[in-house]
Image (cartoon, rainbow, N blue to C red):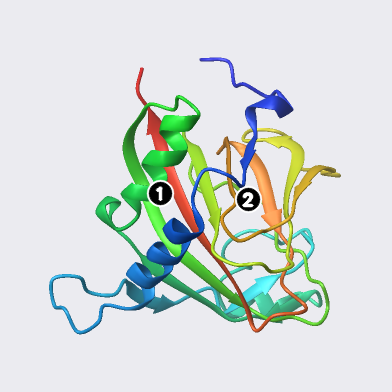
Amino acid sequence: MEELNKSEDYIIEDDNFLTLEDQHDFINKIFRNNGHKETPLPKWRVTNGLEIIKDSQKGVFPYTETPLAFNDQDSKPFFMVLGDLELKDFKDIFDKFCNKHNIKYDKILRSRIAITGMDNDNSLHYAHVDTIIKHDVFLYYLHNVDGDTVFYNKWLGDNMDNPEIIKSVSPKAGKAIRFNGHQFHSNYTTNTKQFRCVLNVCYTLKK
């Protein structure tokens, strides 16, 4: 099995790869189609209506995403909307980041806009990886908002007893991060804004 790069240096943070105009153009592209049928809005869907917060012992499917979550005293409802995207929808900003950091991507496994609602409890969502397929993740913050992304000292296949947060990244409009998708990660819910909005892209690298 190929050795995972578990160095903290593998996580890239960059808030200077796009101009302000680039940032605004992307937001307009995603949320406004100006009536043009050839540039439809993303396919929005509501999902994950229930979740167990703070990794209780039952913090795995189906207890995180179905009514069975209510069997756990730590469960709570939350609001989330996902917008499924195609590469052409975000290729301009993704390519600028990849070109700057010499990233050679191969296939896009999943790409979406994730919008989560406000939570006054500063809730931390459960630690997870997006897929068992070897991949990297590109996470792009569309606006200034609280709700840090956090990384744990656990990797896919590890015993998940007592996971510890070893790094936090604060959202900032125009900032993106790259990390190994097999590192367990999570995020806090915003306490100050009506919603937290990020672009999430899971992709493979060229060999």
Q: Residues within 10 Å of mark 2 (few under 14, many from 20)?
A: many
**In the image, 157: left or right of 160?**
left
Tags 2 and 1 in contact by the CB under 8 Å rule? no
Label 2 vs 1, first from the N-terminus: 1
Alpha carbon distance from label 2 to label 1:
25 Å
For numbered disc 2, what is the local secondary structure? loop
Residue drawn at point x = 32 percent, y = 61 percent? 85
Considering every residue shown, the one lying at the far left of the view is: 38
Q: Position of residue 106 (x, y in %)?
A: 31, 31
Mark number, residue 69: none
Query: What residue is rendered at 39% in x and 62% in y?
Result: 26
- Disc 1 crowd, CA 10 A, few/some/many (<14, 14-19, 20+): some
Tag 1's secondary structure?
helix
Q: Residue at x 46, y 35 (%)?
A: 135
Quadrant for the C terminus in the image: top left
Q: Which residue is mark 1?
A: 93
Displayed quadrant of residue 32:
bottom left
Vertical position of residue 179 compared to residue 148: above or below: above
Taking depth in this image into account, of 156 and 96 the one nearest to the observer is 96
- Indicate the position of residue 169 as horizontal and vertical percent values: 73, 49
Rendered image: mark on residue 128 = 2
Q: Is residue 174 above or below residue 96?
A: below
Which amino acid lies under the numbered mark 2 shown in the image of this protein? His
Q: Quick one: 72 or 149, which is closer to the camera?
A: 149
Who's the residue at 59% across and 21% down the image?
4
Instruction: Locate residue 140, reporting x and y percent.
Output: 53, 54
